[in-house]
Amino acid sequence: MEFRDLFVILGSFQNVLNFFVSHKLLASCQQCSQCGSSMELTETTWVNDGYMWRCTNKRCRTWLSIRSGSFFEGSNIPLSTWLHLMFLWAMQILGSKIARLTSLSKPTVIHALSELRTICSNKVLNAGIKLGGLGKTVEIDESKFEAKRKYKRWRVSEGPWVFGVMERGSQKVLLFSVPDRAWETLVHRLITTHILPGTVIYSDQFTPYIPLNQLGYIHLSLNHSQNVVDPDSGAHTNTIEGVWALVKKKLKWMCGTRYEYIPSYLDEFT
């Protein structure tokens, strides 16, 4: 979607409603919880949304919010503003600027963006995403992040280690905040879960990665202290290191990130 498409959709509430229904963010049909009859979408001035579901049974006539059971349930933000906010977020606009452009308060925007990042995190956790496979190559690496801690006058302090996987060709990326860089964490919990057997894996010569060839992977490593690209195998991790630069630049652009929020921000890049 481009800006001109957004403006067309925002031109009428019916367009906004159709957009959310077509993307399965709002229900396309409802069944009455009172009598079991089907419900129909009815225009009304009772609510700001302009529409509600109404039971077709003349003896029942139960009303139901169009937001019922959706991500928007319980929110007071107009649906058109939600669409505007989501578009700006997808364009990686800063929260403070989103607040100005949508005429929402900064705390409201912060909460809304937190809800959107939670959806990203849940998708990553529940989707069982796997990269690689026969004939495919991934790069893996770890990087130390800085963070801001609450109650310490917002000074930058030591943040978490982050483990990353980047699939060449598709440019798919998985990023995980990890408590340590032990074999159990990086290999047993993450690599074997999210990288398919038969994958060619490029990495540095970090000790936990040494047994990868014994786990069904084709592991090629390089010594960063000697070469950027291994002269024999051609292995390198330049691409995943480029991902680190991009992610850290965004977090720095946001004037730092609270320690506890880093995992959800990482999921935006997945």
Image: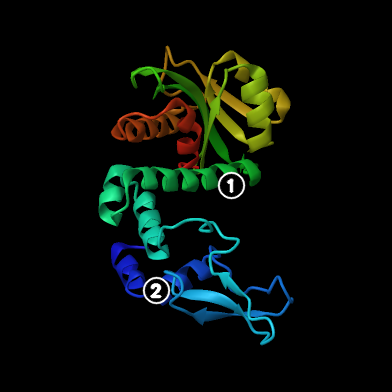
Horizontal and vertical percent position of residue 205: 54, 16
Question: Quick one: label 1, few (<14), some, or many (20+) residues within 10 Å?
Answer: some
Horizontal and vertical percent position of residue 70: 56, 60
- Residue at mark 1 to residue at mark 2: CA–CA distance: 29 Å
Residue 5 falls left or right of residue 124? left
Most foreground residue, 177 or 130 = 177
Residue 97 falls left or right of residue 150? left
Most foreground residue, 235 or 139 = 139
Q: In the rendered view, would you say 102 is above or below 182? A: below
Q: In the rendered view, would you say 200 is above or below 221? A: below
Horizontal and vertical percent position of residue 259: 45, 25
Q: Which mark is residue 235?
A: none
Three-letter amino acid code of the residue under disc 1: Lys
- Please name the residue that numbered disc 2 is placed on: 13
Of tags 1 and 2, the one toward the viewer is: 2
Most foreground residue, 64 or 12 = 64
Residue 106 falls left or right of residue 233? left
Which SS class for mark 1? helix
The residue sitting at 74% across, 76% down in the picture is 36
Horizontal and vertical percent position of residue 199: 63, 36
Query: Number of labelled discs?
Result: 2
The answer to whether residue 179 of the structure is visible from this angle is yes
Question: Quick one: label 2, few (<14), some, or many (20+) residues within 10 Å?
Answer: some
Most foreground residue, 18 or 65 = 65
**Of all residues shown, which one is farthest toward the bottom?**
58
The residue sitting at 27% across, 47% down in the picture is 97
Three-letter amino acid code of the residue under disc 2: Phe
The residue sitting at 64% across, 22% down in the picture is 185
Q: Which quadrant of the view contains residue 133?
A: top right
- Please name the residue that numbered disc 1 is placed on: 123
Closer to the chain start, of discs 1 and 2, is: 2
The answer to whether residue 231 of the structure is visible from this angle is no
